[in-house]
Image: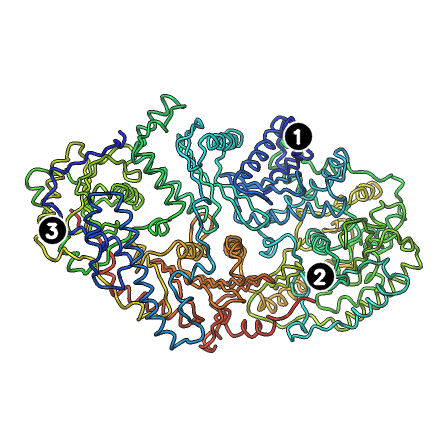
Amino acid sequence: MSVQFIVLFRDDDDNKDDSCKLLLYHDLTAHMLSTNEKEQKIGIIKGMWRFSNEFSQSNDYCHVELDSYSMLVLEVEPSYYLALGFENTHNSQWPKYKVRLSQCYQFFAMQHGKMQDIEDKTLSGLLNEHFIPFWDEINLIPDYFLMQDINTAIDDKMFPCCQFADALNSISEVKDWQNYLKNNVLLSEENYLNIKDVCVYHLPKNNKNTKEYGFITNFDPQFKSLPTLSNWLVGIDSMYGTVSSHGLAGTMSLTETEQQIELDAEEAHHEQPPNIKTVWDNVTLPITFTMDALKDIGQLTGVSNSLSLFTNMKPSWNLWSSSSENGAGSAKLDDKDEYSWLISPLNPSFLPKVYQMRKFYLQFDDWSQYNILFWKFKDVIVAVIVDPSFKKISEESFLMKLQEELWNGISLFYENTGFEKRQCSFDYTILFKEEGKYYSSIPRWKNGLDESDTALKLVIKGLDETLQFLTNNANRKSSVATVTEVGHDMSLTDHPIPSDPSKGEDGTEKTDKSESSIFSKLNESQLVELNKELMVILGTRSLTVWYKDANTKERMLKLNNGLMVYLLENNRKLVLIIKNWFIDSQQKTKSKRSTDMIESLGKDVSTWWNRIKDHEPL
Amino acid sequence: MRRSPSFQISTKNSAKPTTSIDLTNHLSARGGLFYQDIDTGTTASIKAKNDPNLLAATYDHSISADTDLNIDLQSLITSELNSLYPLTLNQETSNKSANTTKFIDERGGKDKHFFVFTSAGKLVFSQWENENHAMGLTGIIHTVMNYFNINDNTAMRQFTMYGKDGIMTRFVFLDKNHIKLMVQCNNNYESTAQLQQQLDLVYSYIISSVSQRNLNKLMLKRSNFDLQHYLTDLDQQLLKSLCESLATQPKLTWFANSLECLPMSPKKRNAINSILSTTYLDFNISNHNGQILYTLVTSLDMRLISILRPSNHTLHTMDLQILFEVVRAQLTDLLLDKVLWFPICFQKFNDNGFLYALIKVLPNNTIMMVISSQKNAFDILNEFVRRIEDKMIDDNTCNNLELQLLDWHKKFPYINHFIYKMKRTVQIYTPSQPTNEMLQFYYHLKNLCEDDKGTNLNKSSVAMLKWKNDATPGLLSGVYWATEKFELYILLNDINLSNQSILKSAKLLIQHIREIESYLFISRGVTF
């Protein structure tokens, strides 16, 4: 429970009576606050903001540090202030909170538009729907921010990108599959100017190789909302462990399992566990939601489509996560599971509208609303951005054709992915500031729902309740979203849960790969320590920002515990290299004449760097 | 007890009229590692004795002469280096200050303001020009602090505004029950921990003249007590000058949280030590036992020469820093051959009571500071100082104390400037006072390895910082090396160096300093 409260209010400059419009106040610690108390807090926040205006103008955000908690205040839109309070235990991690808070607003604006364009009444409702579940979920995961990698602390507009081997070889040519997609999807006569852009992501279920995770390509360099869209997608993937229709539709959420709720209740039985209640409060779909519907849902989530095998609804990502790592596993799956529309007008019409089409406010030349469809093929997620006036998009034949083109394109991609596979003994992040793209080898956090976590489960608003109703409480834990634990009273002989040997396989694989990242070699407390140290080193970055005359700033730090960090920043990019100098044997062999600071990181780093340093993002 | 506006200044007891207070020689001695004794400005300094206004002028003059000299020497070294690095180094970039000014601007005093107010919100002191406005600001911040105190039962540590242009404005707080302090800071090199330490220094400064016990008594009796008018004009003045120098001219000793010693040959230091100890022993025999607590000998610019102390007590660095600040502010009077006698409360030593300090400048350009716990010990202490003075005048070794380290630039051609801190004795050595810009850079180096609370990331760490501009030649680079024993800050010359040679130089420098440690630092002082 690290986040304590979230507040959003408007402070109009022309406000004569000097009061603020409170739009959202959510206390996650379940303290009941009177309106008066809420207004007091807002008054204080406003007071501090105005106070600091005495000393400096054009303020962007504010970090308040108290002995017991910390607070962040962002001016998200002119006169709209968003404040977040959180526990002080990991105060050094505050930039991560700031980045997430800022992204939370960006996601809101993407889905609903700018706050100033929405009427207060509607706005309050929308804010409640968006902000509260967002932070509730984060709070469900203990040490959420501590586990986030260092890249999430740098900037709110940066997103991970896949790395390709040819970049290291200084070749950056447009690949066949990109040309194919460009010519056949974007530039085809029918689609030209109607399909605004196609964004391709590679989001594998397993989280082992960061270099193969993230954004791959898009086609319109004018697409300015790319960071927001990408972070939204990546956020869904890391929070729910996968990207599914429900996640994209925004109906999926994370809650505690009943087991955990009971545990919690035992610990504090005077408190009413809030989640049981919300599950039933959220029944929004009619009960006429039938078995057919479930079947369709099953299909669109890639779940086995026979209702008799209802309890086999061990969703496809579970299968993949346990078997496709070896590569052989994917062959077992039938083609249908490998590609499908996640969000498209092909989805059954009784489902909420968000399943047919997402309408996002995005910025190309100007900020306006576009329709987005999502399609997936194995680990690739494709977002198709469509002009709202293009009606053909709801025709089945058109979608089939589009799907075919996408399939052809992504198949070409899969023929030769060309991911960067070379191992290196150090970790790095390269951020291109203007584009927001970053390439990193630092492992990302991903919710491990399908592994051993029994405390949390996924629920889908509306659908799960019906499910429970239909199955007559046969298995309280079953959910359309995931079956994290198959009920013990069900026989599942044909789909055994991955047994220990396969886990062993995973384990050995892990140790092989761990050569590549120093992060995987550390235990939890060491990781926490490392995370803290990196935050400090990155934190000093902001202090030197205003020395504009020095357009290249390099710093290197070598600690006695083996940590060696190099940070380079110029107008174009930021490079972070982390190394353990204890295990570096090559250090002595480098030339003595070199004057570059980076050379002292060892030969492997400098060879790598010399290859990559002039490379620009695709 | 407050510091009275006119310290008890006594001239009648001064020994022989002094003849050799040579300002130029000693006030400018900070850069004096490069040259032999130069006897200029004697007439000016004599005039200065009569006219305090002239003093400042002399000071300025001597400083500029000093820098010129440095530049000359620099250019000498440069020409030597130029032959080695003909392409990368030219006179302009190797100029002592140009190295930093290229990237770091000299910042005015406008970027930092101290505010001190009571728990009732009454303004005690502010650096804000308009006092009414300052009161308004204090009111707001007082409300905010109290809100968190009452509602959430927590205290505010700091808050920071981040501007769109990357400039941040920080507000750091210190809540000392009856007195609350805040500093607003627009600069970007001091960390929260460092700012909090400065607030602590300001607070200690107030306590040094009021004492915690008196303050408690006053504030408990009437919580809206007006402390501002209780403080004397002199207190206010001293507070103002302290805050101003914290804002515009941060001192090296504050930065490193330590004291500076005068480098001198062990022979000379021992001579002074033995004068101190024999005088003390003589004195004790003649029935003045327990009157003298501490005796400090410093140079005119507050660099320690010797210390006489009880074997079981040391003085806290911050207490000494405050004492030195008070003395520094009275230096003009002291140089007119006056004796200073005033009460002072050492907050870290005992914040409830006062100690009494007698300060006097001796003819060999040292300052004697004798501290007693007895209120009426002036005559005894004065006699003690007189005897020491006599002995020092008789002893030839007690003149020209500063040792000139002439050749370090030759030995370490890559190093432009450095600071070495010996952690055990909390003392620093630097060959010349760093400029403000240099100090800013050192702050950045230090911050690399420190978290927000001021703790080092690791017991031992090395950090390097390099700034350059691709368009114009020249770079700014430095090394910070911290171990359990020492901290070393190096500003490198403006040449492209390999890391090997940088670290090698740093290692050699440390070795060299270790060899001459007894010249540079006071290891124990004289104890009784």
Disc 1 chain ID? A
Disc 2 chain ID? A
**Residue type highlighted by circle 1:** Asn
**Residue type highlighted by circle 2:** Phe
Q: Are marks 1 and 3 in contact (CB under 8 Å)?
A: no
Residue B68: quarter of image: bottom left
Numbered circles on residues, count: 3
Q: Are marks 3 and 2 in contact (CB under 8 Å)?
A: no
Residue assigned mark 2 = A215
Label 1 SS: loop
User: Where A97 falls versus B480 (above or below)?
Assistant: above
At horizontal 76% and vertical 33% (from top left) the residue drawn is: A121
Residue assigned mark 1 = A15
Residue A348 in picture, x, y percent from top left: 89, 49
Question: Which one is nearer the viewer's eye here, A553 or A408?
Answer: A553
Residue A324 in picture, x, y percent from top left: 73, 65
Residue assigned mark 3 = B275
Label 3 SS: helix
Q: Earlier in the sequence, mark 1 or mark 2?
A: 1
Label 1 crowd bin: few (<14), some (14–19), many (20+), radius 10 Å: few
Q: In this view of the protein, can residue A76 be seen by the observer? A: yes
